[in-house]
Amino acid sequence: MASLADKAILSGADNRPLMLEKDMYDSWKSRMEL
């Protein structure tokens, strides 16, 4: 699960602003916890 999130961030970090990527990751992580 964590590796999948890391992969998504690594692949997206090159194309998106870091803050936007972090915000998307935070919202995704909160969904996974629910």
Image (cartoon, rainbow, N blue to C red):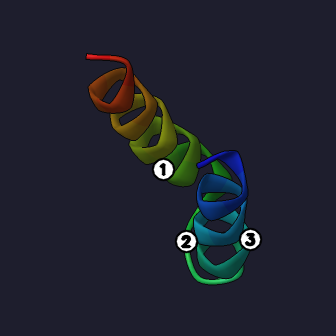
Q: Is residue 33 depicted above or below 32 in this figure?
A: above
Using residue 18 as the reference point, say whether residue 22 is left or right of it: left
Q: Amino acid at mark 1?
A: Leu
Q: Name the residue rendered at 61%, 62% in the picture.
A: 4
Q: Amino acid at mark 3?
A: Leu
Q: Marks 1 and 3, how far apart in space? A: 13 Å
Q: Report helix, strand or loop for mark 1.
A: helix
Q: Report helix, strand or loop for mark 3.
A: helix
Q: Marks 2 and 1, how far apart in space? A: 7 Å
Q: Name the residue rendered at 37%, 39% in the picture.
A: 28
Q: Position of residue 25 (x, y in %)?
A: 49, 42
Is the C-beta separation of discs 1 and 3 under 8 Å?
Answer: no
Q: Position of residue 18 (x, y in %)?
A: 66, 53
Q: Amino acid at mark 2?
A: Arg
Q: Is residue 5 depicted above or below 13 in this figure?
A: above
Q: Point out the frontmost of discs 1 and 3.
A: 3
Q: Marks 2 and 3, how far apart in space? A: 10 Å
Is the C-beta separation of discs 2 and 1 under 8 Å?
Answer: yes
* Residue receiving disc 1: 20
Badge 2: residue crowd in 10 Å (few <14, some 14–19, many ≥20)? few
Residue 10's mark? 3
Badge 3: residue crowd in 10 Å (few <14, some 14–19, many ≥20)? few
Q: Name the residue rendered at 69%, 70% in the picture.
A: 7
Q: Report helix, strand or loop for mark 2.
A: loop
Residue 2's mark? none
**Image quadrant containing the C terminus:** top left
* Residue receiving disc 2: 16
Lower sequence index among marks 1 and 3: 3
Q: Position of residue 8 (x, y in %)?
A: 58, 68
Using residue 31 as the reference point, say whether residue 17 is left or right of it: right
